[in-house]
Image (cartoon, rainbow, N blue to C red):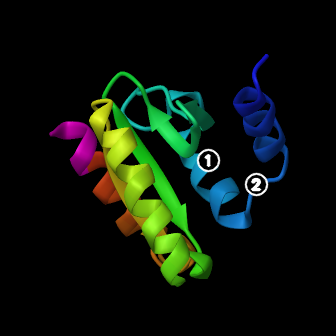
């Protein structure tokens, strides 16, 4: 098992409350019958959630993503993932906390496109 798979396994054990909340709605093909995986390695990066069938990545971002160094890293990371054919949608943690229905609606829209 490579280091990214090990890291992903550890991240699955230590999900944020927002990741737990969204995962409860994505797991077991609950959303339109699509299979999602959590903390999934794509190359040297680990994405929060992915539907491989639709090539859709869902990322949840906390406040640390507003720091300049992290913004640059996120841009490079997103370019890498998009270059591999994935579409990425991002949500702030407060969107999960305050408007989970709206988040799910946006995910459904992406899955239907």
Prevailing secondary structure class for the magenta stretch in the rendered image: helix
Q: Earlier in the sequence, mark 1 or mark 2?
A: 2
Q: Indicate which label's residue lies in the foreground, 1 or 2.
A: 2
Residue 102 appears at what percent x and percent y? 36, 68
Q: Is residue 83 above or below residue 19?
A: above
Q: Is residue 21 above or below residue 84?
A: below
Identify the residue shown where x is 27% and y is 39%: 111
Q: Which mark is residue 60?
A: none
What segment carries the magenta color? 109-113
Q: Which residue position holds label 2?
A: 15
Task: Tell me which corner region of the image, top left, top right, bottom left or bottom right, holds residue 18.
Answer: bottom right
Between residue 72 and residue 1, name the one nearer to us. Answer: 72
Identify the residue shown where x is 29% and y is 58%: 106
Between residue 40 and residue 82, name the one nearer to us. Answer: 82
Q: Which residue position holds label 1?
A: 23
| CB contact under 8 Å: marks 1 and 2 | yes
Question: In what element is the residue under mark 2?
Answer: loop
Alpha carbons under labels 1 and 2: distance apart: 10 Å
Task: Tell me which corner region of the image, top left, top right, bottom left or bottom right, holds residue 113.
Answer: top left
Identify the residue shown where x is 35% and y is 55%: 89
Horizontal side of residue 95 vs 83, given as left or right: right
Residue 64 appears at what percent x and percent y? 61, 78
Question: In what element is the residue under mark 1?
Answer: helix
């Amino acid at each position: 098992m490579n280091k990214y798979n090990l890291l992903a396994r550890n991240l699955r054990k230590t999900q944020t409350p927002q990741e737990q909340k969204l995962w409860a709605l994505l797991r077991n093909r609950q959303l339109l019958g699509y299979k999602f995986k959590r903390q999934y390695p794509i190359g040297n990066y680990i994405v929060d959630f992915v539907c491989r069938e639709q090539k859709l990545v869902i990322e949840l971002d906390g406040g640390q993503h507003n720091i300049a160094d992290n913004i640059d890293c996120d841009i490079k990371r997103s370019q890498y993932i998009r270059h591999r054919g994935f579409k990425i949608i991002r949500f702030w943690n407060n969107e999960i906390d305050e408007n989970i229905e709206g988040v799910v609606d946006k995910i459904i829209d992406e899955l239907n496109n």
